[in-house]
Image (tube, helix red, strand yellow):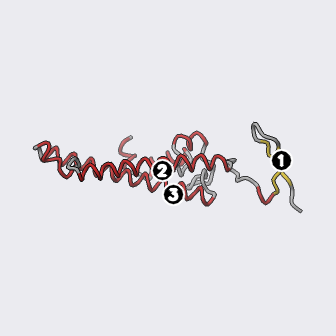
Amino acid sequence: MSSLICVKRPGSSETKLGSDHLPNTLNVTKNLYSEFRELLQAQRRQIVDEVREKIAASGEGLGFVNQSKITDDDGAADAAAEMEVAMTIRESQELQEIEAALARIGDGSYGTCSDCGDEIGMARLKANPSARRCLPCQEKYEQTLDPVHRAGT
């Protein structure tokens, strides 16, 4: 026998769900999944567009490869090249984080901390839609596992 659960959403009438159709324990509704999916896809498009612009600019002689010709300073050109490489690496990492978040939306685990299994707060997800850890676990990660963040504190 299947029990029924009544779900009341703001601005709508009651909806009855069978126990085999329970929302996940995070109370992240299908609409929120769609909103986060759209936000993540927009972020992905923005990063890809920025990378494309950089590639086009480098082809036009504006990229870091030609920086020494513009500045006549090898040190400045090297620094500019290092900065461009670092930015490209960061953009690649952001794309990977976005793809992972989209995969979590697809498999229903979005909004669940990958370390402790608790809910990731809605405010955190809104601030960082690709977050994979709740705030306490992220802070612990940054303090104990990530030497880049540990050195900065």
Residue topped by disc 2: 141
Left or right of 25 in this view: 34? left
For marks 2 and 1 on the same chain, the one whose residue lies earlier in the sequence: 1
In front here: 37 or 119?
37
For marks 3 and 2 on the same chain, the one whose residue lies earlier in the sequence: 3
Kindly report the distance in space between the C-alpha atoms of the residues bearing marks 3 and 2.
18 Å
**SS at circle 2:** helix
Residue topped by disc 1: 6
For marks 1 and 3 on the same chain, the one whose residue lies earlier in the sequence: 1
Kind of residue sitting beneath label 1 = Cys
Q: Position of residue 119 (x, y in %)?
A: 63, 48
Q: Position of residue 126 (x, y in %)?
A: 56, 41
**SS at circle 3:** helix
CB within 8 Å, label 2 to label 1: no
Residue at point 33%, 52% (across, down) = 88
Closest to the camera, between mark 3 and mark 2, is 3
Left or right of 140 in this view: 34? right
Residue 136 location, quadrant:
top right
Kindly report the distance in space between the C-alpha atoms of the residues bearing marks 2 and 1.
39 Å
Residue at point 82%, 44% (across, down) = 14
In front here: 53 or 76?
53
Quadrant where the image shows the C terminus: top left
**Dot 2, crowdedness within 10 Å: few (<14), some or many (≥20)?**
some
Q: Position of residue 52 (x, y in %)?
A: 34, 52
Residue furthest toward the right?
Answer: 1
